[in-house]
């Protein structure tokens, strides 16, 4: 794994600063995703048309319901929030050469921990929200650190451990929410409702959790591109042996990256609990961590880009119900559009069509299995 | 895993199985059959991963490849009324999905994990969107008892009284091991996955090699999917692969990218699943079922943590090859 | 106070406008009640909306049964029915609201997870009638009826039959996850019924792990085969597709329908899982379709009451295995079902 490996000199995320380079160099970075999304909608439109529905009407319904009403906007923001954070969680891992498939498990453990802190503690709001939030993040970080420590000290691939830890987490929270932390005198598997002092407020129509997620994404954009710690992450991710020669503690960096990744996924779960569900109920957190992988890849491991990627997915998922209500199109069409978008953003098809360059080098986001 | 630990573990498990067999023949045989059955799709899917990664291409889309193949295989069999045709359609679909990954990851030099993820999402969306209810397979796949061998105590009923896919799933890793380590194809494949530039210099076409290997591996994913829908579950449901494609990745790493290692790892994982369900059925220990259900995953992690050495992936895995 | 009324008037007016827009934009709003397309034709029509739990309307399980009930009610009342499938449980409220805004008369919400969303919607919209399938009502809300079933009774009857029918003295069950109340009630009821029929019978209950608990047919099949190998001759499959996998597997076993049987759940699975017809002794039925239909019809007639409506449970017809069940067994089982309904037989199953 030499530093001169040609495939690695052009990593998309080593230089996320758009201010370097001229405007023409920046152009593809914006035009390609936009054109890809439009093309994906066109292909999705064909699918819709095959079902006997006018695609223009279908998309009008989808977007007007998701973005045209205040409730719709609120839901889009609520849905995007955990997606931004799990997307960031996967991104931080990828930067440090780790593939964290376990965001789902970390999110679940954190959502439960947050709920426990939310109903168990009694304190004023200014304390309760941060305490519950931090407690949840710590739960997520701790859960991820199992995989981090095994990777750092025992060289066990985090891919295996996070897959296994996902299954363990699902069983664990199911047990905890059905036995010790269960809301008494009712049959459902769920915790009691959190105290009102722990509920995240909504400013106008903007949930505070959404604002937190945006700020965190921006902070991580800065952290990963401008700070020494970010440099360490990137170096360990790109070339651990070079990092070792440069005096960076590879083990420490892996541990830290995994913990931070878990804390971010955990924050996603915590905000879900404090801002949306108000308690822990296993079914309400399904799939959020796995969407994080899609978002990190769609955003090409760029923290800032997780924001639009998450909002896109949030909008599609939010509008899908109205789409079915008014046109009868099944909500799974969203997955098809999403997959095509990811393909077009990542494959050279659009770039070749638009810029007529044959030899556009593909950016690599992920790093194999590390080692 | 260090080889001597692996052998020691295998011997301990083997002795335990024989002891159990003498204590309770029926339970032992049925739990082992369960384990093997649980392992079959994991073995086939892990082979997909091994062929791809030994060639230098990560295939995280195995889950999606299996789901698409199971869908095509099931509905193919139901519509044509022919199980063999359905199986072939499933395997063919797997190859198409393999070629899809190869085109993205090799020809276009896309990020490999992204290419695989596209397959996963696309498979969920398409199979769910086009699913129709009420289709039924035209019949069942036969169970073939191998004469003489099936009469051996313990091994006979477990290993030699199965469906054809199961025999294939046990045979393919052995064949693949020979192919990978004893043939020219294997040498080239490994060269392409370890040192593509050296392979290139010595006249092996890196990209064509990778492309065809990934495509052919897709056929194995097709088999895994066809097995699930046609021989095992006898039905297709949305998302019914239930994460087996991801577990197979873990099995592949567990087995150190070695087909026989992965075969053993998959069987071990199946065994833990069998034990978990048997512990629950017999109500041996009074602990909540969730903890029993965690057992396979906890055991796998503990085992890896205790005995892990450095398991190294093929060194060029995940990186598209570009000529200097 | 005036302000509130004004606001309500504006909301109502905008709802009418919205509904009108929807109606004109819907295009093919034919009067056919079969599809999920088009829209409620207007305020004069009797419109039934159904929100599924996460999952699809063709799940061969409770979503499908409830939807069939809605369709039957629509054709019986000359009304119009439409569904929306929930993908994310956080959308329950929004999905219900779509029907409210389109001025549907009755909204059926399926699944106990939607209980709270139904209560909130019912309280906010006193003029809309709600039917909550599998949602037990702790307090009575006049415009919301919980359609609930004593699953333990159905399980008990199935177990009683199994206890009488078993030749090996061993019976089994392949179940979803035990943290879902109806599943546990079915399973424990089955066990209690079998022991009541035959105290020496050995009953094995195995639950799937919580992830993919209801969508892992291959695990269900493998588990069923293991239980058969260990001597069980009757197996109850209760857990969505996982349980269905068990049924399909048992139908493949030698002796299926003669010495080896399976028991389905929720609906008469003779129709929903035809592959299992050969071994299917009966199904521990929740008459969900009938209950949904009855409540919708009551809603139209104005006779529906708030609180809980206890739907019927029972055993589905024997179908292909009719000849395999001795007449005295049939008689005893019928007696037990009658006793369960009358309350003279208690299952003594609690969660």
Image: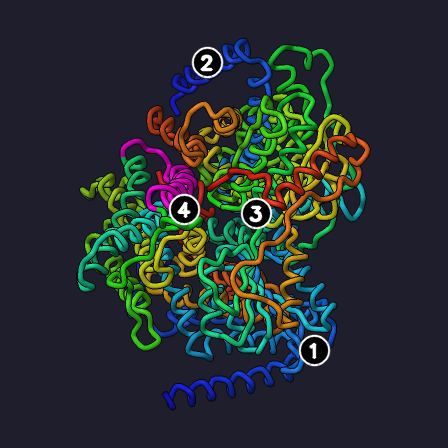
Q: Disc 2 to disc 3, how far (Cα)?
A: 51 Å
Q: Is residue C65 above or below residue A314?
A: above
Foreground of the two, A21 or A63: A63
Q: Chain of mark 2?
A: B
Say which residue appears at 56% left-offset and 39% top-offset: C346
Q: In the figure, is residue B79 to the left or right of C153?
A: right
Dot 2: within a 10 Å radius of its alpha carbon, few (fewer than 14), some, or many (20 or more) residues? few
Main SS of the magenta segment? Answer: helix
CA distance for labels 1 and 4 = 45 Å
- Mark number displayed over residue B11: 2
State the SS at label 4: loop
Q: Which residue is mark 3?
A: C150
Residue positioned 49% across, 34% down in the render:
B191
Q: How is the image coloured?
A: rainbow
Which quarter of the figure has residue B250? top left
How many other residues sit within 10 Å of disc 1, few (<14), some (14-19) or many (≥20)? some
Label 4: which residue?
A: A101
Mark 3 or 1: the one toward you: 3
Circle number at residue C29: 1
Please give the name of the residue rendered at 42% of the width and 90% of the height, measured from the top-left corner. C6
Residue range in magenta is: A153-181
Q: Quadrant of the N terminus of chain A?
A: top left
Q: Is residue C14 left or right of residue A106?
A: right
Total residue callouts: 4
Q: Tell us which disc is closer to us: 2 or 3.
A: 3
């Amino acid at each position: 794994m030499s530093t001169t490996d040609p495939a690695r000199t052009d990593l998309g995320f080593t230089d996320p600063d758009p201010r370097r380079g001229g405007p023409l160099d920046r152009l593809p970075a914006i035009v390609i995703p936009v054109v890809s999304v439009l093309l994906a909608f066109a292909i999705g439109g064909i699918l819709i048309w095959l079902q006997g529905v006018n695609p223009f009407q279908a998309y009008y319904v989808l977007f007007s319901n998701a973005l045209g009403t205040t409730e719709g906007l609120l839901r889009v923001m609520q849905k995007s929030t955990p997606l931004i954070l799990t997307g960031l969680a996967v991104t931080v891992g990828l930067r440090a050469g780790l593939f964290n498939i376990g965001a789902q498990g970390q999110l679940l453990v954190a959502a439960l921990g947050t709920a426990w802190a939310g109903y168990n503690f009694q304190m004023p709001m200014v304390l309760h929200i941060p305490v519950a939030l931090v407690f949840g993040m710590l739960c997520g970080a701790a859960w991820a650190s199992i995989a981090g420590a095994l990777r750092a000290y025992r060289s066990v691939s985090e891919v295996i451990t996070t897959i296994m830890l996902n299954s363990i987490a699902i069983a664990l929270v199911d047990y905890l929410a059905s036995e010790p932390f269960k809301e008494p005198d009712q049959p459902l598997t769920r915790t009691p409702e959190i105290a009102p002092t722990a509920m995240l407020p909504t400013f106008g129509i903007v949930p505070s959790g959404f604002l937190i997620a945006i700020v965190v994404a921006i902070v991580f954009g800065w952290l990963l591109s401008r700070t020494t710690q970010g440099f360490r992450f990137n170096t360990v991710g790109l070339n651990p042996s070079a990092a070792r020669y440069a005096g960076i503690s590879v083990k420490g960096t892996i541990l830290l990256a995994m913990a931070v990744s878990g804390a971010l996924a955990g924050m996603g779960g915590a905000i879900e609990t404090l801002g949306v569900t108000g308690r822990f109920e296993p079914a309400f957190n399904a799939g959020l961590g796995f969407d994080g992988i899609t978002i990190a890849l769609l955003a090409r491991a760029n923290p800032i880009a997780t924001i639009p990627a998450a909002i896109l997915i949030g909008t599609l998922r939010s509008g899908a119900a109205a789409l079915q209500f008014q046109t009868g199109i099944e909500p799974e069409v969203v997955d098809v559009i999403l997959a095509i978008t990811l393909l077009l953003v990542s494959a050279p098809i659009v770039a070749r069509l638009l810029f007529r360059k044959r030899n556009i080098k593909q950016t690599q986001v992920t790093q194999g299995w590390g080692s | 895993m260090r080889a001597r630990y692996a052998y020691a573990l295998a011997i301990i498990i083997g002795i335990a199985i024989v002891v159990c067999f003498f204590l309770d023949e029926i339970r032992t045989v049925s739990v082992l059959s369960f384990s093997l059955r649980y392992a079959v799709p994991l073995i086939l899917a892990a082979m997909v991963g091994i062929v791809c990664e030994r060639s230098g291409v990560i295939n995280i889309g195995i889950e999606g490849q299996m789901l698409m193949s199971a869908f095509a295989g099931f509905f193919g069999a139901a519509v044509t009324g022919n199980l063999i045709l359905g199986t072939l359609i499933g395997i063919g679909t797997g190859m198409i999905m393999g070629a899809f990954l190869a085109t993205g990851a090799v020809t276009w030099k896309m990020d490999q994990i992204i290419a695989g993820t596209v397959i996963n999402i696309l498979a969920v969306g398409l199979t769910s969107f086009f699913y129709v209810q009420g289709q039924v397979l035209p019949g069942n796949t036969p169970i073939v008892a191998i004469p003489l061998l099936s009469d051996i105590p313990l091994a006979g009923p477990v290993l030699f009284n199965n469906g054809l896919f199961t025999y294939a799933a046990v045979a393919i890793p052995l064949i693949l091991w020979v192919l990978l380590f004893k043939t020219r194809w294997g040498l080239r494949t490994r060269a392409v996955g370890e040192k593509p530039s050296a392979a290139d210099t010595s006249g092996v076409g890196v990209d064509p090699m990778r492309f065809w290997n990934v495509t052919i591996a897709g056929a194995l994913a097709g088999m895994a999917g066809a097995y699930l829908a046609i021989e095992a579950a006898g039905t297709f449901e949305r998302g019914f692969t239930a994460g087996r494609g991801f577990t197979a990745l873990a099995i592949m790493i567990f087995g150190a990218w070695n087909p026989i290692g992965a075969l053993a790892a998959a069987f071990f994982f199946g065994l833990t699943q069998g034990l978990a369900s048997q512990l629950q059925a017999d109500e041996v220990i009074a602990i909540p079922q969730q903890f029993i259900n965690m057992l396979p995953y906890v055991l796998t992690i503990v085992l890896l943590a205790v005995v892990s050495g450095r398991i190294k992936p093929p060194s060029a895995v995940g990186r598209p090859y570009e000529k200097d | 106070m005036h302000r509130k009324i004004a606001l309500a008037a504006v909301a109502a007016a905008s709802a009418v406008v919205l509904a009108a827009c929807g109606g004109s934009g819907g295009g093919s709003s034919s009067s056919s009640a079969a599809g999920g397309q088009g829209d409620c034709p207007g305020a004069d029509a009797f419109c039934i909306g159904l929100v599924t739990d996460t999952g699809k309307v063709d799940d061969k399980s409770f979503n499908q049964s409830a939807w069939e009930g809605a369709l039957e009610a629509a054709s019986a009342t000359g009304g119009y029915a439409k569904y929306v499938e929930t993908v994310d449980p956080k959308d329950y409220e929004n999905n219900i609201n779509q029907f409210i805004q389109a001025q549907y008369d009755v909204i059926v919400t399926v699944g106990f997870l939607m209980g709270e969303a139904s209560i909130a919607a019912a309280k906010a919209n006193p003029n809309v009638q709600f039917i909550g399938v599998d949602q037990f009502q702790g307090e009575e809300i006049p415009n919301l009826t919980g359609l609930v079933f004593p699953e333990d009774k159905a399980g008990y009857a199935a177990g009683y039959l199994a206890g009488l029918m078993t030749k090996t003295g061993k019976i089994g069950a392949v179940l979803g996850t035990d943290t879902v109340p109806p599943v546990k009630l079915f399973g424990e009821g089955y066990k209690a019924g079998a022991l009541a029929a035959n105290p020496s019978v050995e009953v094995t209950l195995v639950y799937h792990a919580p992830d993919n608990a209801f969508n892992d047919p291959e695990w269900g099949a493998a588990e069923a085969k293991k239980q058969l190998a260990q001597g069980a001759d009757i197996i109850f499959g209760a857990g969505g597709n996982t349980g269905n996998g068990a049924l399909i597997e048992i139908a493949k076993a030698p002796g299926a329908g003669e010495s080896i049987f399976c028991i389905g759940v929720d609906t008469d699975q003779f129709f929903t899982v035809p592959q299992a017809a050969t071994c299917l002794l009966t199904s521990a039925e929740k008459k969900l379709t009938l209950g949904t239909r009855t409540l919708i019809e009551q809603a139209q007639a104005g006779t529906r009451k708030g609180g809980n409506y206890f739907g019927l449970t029972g055993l589905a017809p024997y179908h292909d295995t009719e000849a395999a069940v001795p007449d005295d067994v049939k008689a005893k089982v019928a007696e037990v079902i009658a006793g369960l309904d009358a309350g003279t037989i208690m299952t003594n199953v609690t969660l």
